[in-house]
Image (spheres, grey):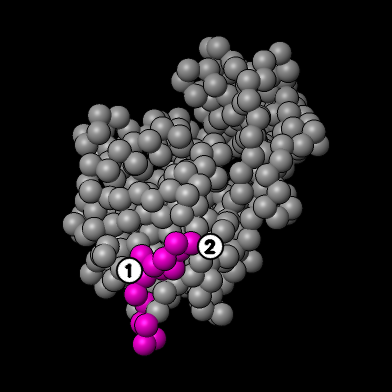
Amino acid sequence: MSDVVVVGGGIIGCCVAFELATRHRVRVTVLERAVPGAEASSAAAGILGAQIESHGKPLDPAIFGLLLASREGHADLDARLNEMVGFGSGFKRCGVLKVSIADDLEAQYGWQRDRDVRIAFLDGDEARRLEPALAKNIASAVHLPDEAQVDPPQLLRALQQGCAAAGVTFKTGTIVSGIARASGKVIGVDVQDGRIEAAAVVVAAGSWSSMVSGLPDDLRRVRPVRGQIVQVETRPPIARNIVFGARGYVVTRPDGRTLLGATMEEVGHVKEVTVGGVHAVLGHAIGMMPALADAPITSTWCGFRPATREDRPLIGAVEPGLFVATGHHRNGVLLAPETARVVADLVGTGRTDRDLTPFAPTR
């Protein structure tokens, strides 16, 4: 019997397992329906955009605090993984530049001046001095120098090796049919060929979380939101910062890979890259940085963001022995370290130092 079963082998599930095994010294089994990170985790662009995620409106202090803490938690996680397995997440403090043709970005983001974060407002010429490839019709920008990025596939590989080194067991191709209970108490999970017993269960199954049978009826629901990404090559990299516009982003990796994204589509679990999706992504990216029109396309893919109606993640205890860490929508990679820390503390000690009331799993 494991001390803890984690349902879901994406970045959040692996992060939770890593924290439980390394800090709380418990035996953990991670169950994954496919292979670890096969869905949203490996499809993500890896943007650590705590400040840009306000999307032009003031955030609840609890949410903003969670975003900022988790962004900084990535630097610590990268260092721990480097020390433990010899490589990290590809963490890079690259900054974010949000650009606009006509929007009043200062009106949208000016509230952050009072939140003890670094932020600067630029006119179009100042923005082009920072990123010369920007279109000439860009009229204004907001620069967030402390934003960062990771390379999600690399982060997943490092987490998996770190988990293995800490004694975590992975079971792939395992479909969880339900939460197992006896005498009203959670005792593990039922799978296709039997039962895996555990003292505690953490559901971190992304957009499939609500499909796990046996969750309480009042648990807030999670649904998939498809995002399509186009990868091109720009050598040398076309930008130093992550560049955001009104409907998408451009993320460059140091080796010249450039990710253009991403659509937001309510299509269920339909895993298809479409002509319309690729057209929309390319059109917006080229509108921001015209030189991208000459870049060769090297790959396209899509993934499913786990969204909730309230657009807030579900983090915390559902009942004794049952915990959830899901519903992070666009911010699964960003919020993985802090989500994992607080959930591991709850599982391991029964308490945490962060107020999770805004992220309560039940209504």
Q: Identify the secondary structure beneath mark 2.
A: helix
Q: Residue furthest left?
A: 25
Picture quadrant of residue 223: bottom right
Residue annotated with mark 2: 209
- Position of 278 compared to 224: left or right? right
Q: Is 361 contained in the magenta span?
A: no
Q: Magenta region's main secondary structure?
A: strand
Q: Residue at (73%, 28%) from the top-left corner?
A: 282
Q: Residue at (29%, 57%) from the top-left corner?
A: 28
Q: Residue at (71%, 41%) from the top-left corner?
A: 272
**Which numbered circle lies on residue 95?**
none
Q: How far across and down, in percent of the image, does residue 150 sit? A: 43, 35
Q: Is 186 contained in the magenta span?
A: yes
**Which numbered circle lies on residue 197?**
1
> Which region shows up in magenta?
182-197
What distance separates the C-alpha of mark 1 from that of mark 2? Answer: 19 Å
Q: Residue furthest front?
A: 193
Tell which of 273 and 146 is nearer to you: 273
Residue 29 makes an appearance in the image: yes
- Position of 89 compared to 269: left or right? left
Amino acid type, mark 2: Ser
Asked if 294 appears above or below 5 in the picture, the reply is above
Tell me the crowding category of disc 1: few under 14, some 14 to 19, or many 20 or more residues within 10 angstroms, Cα based.
Answer: some
Q: Which mark is first along the chain, 2 or 1?
A: 1
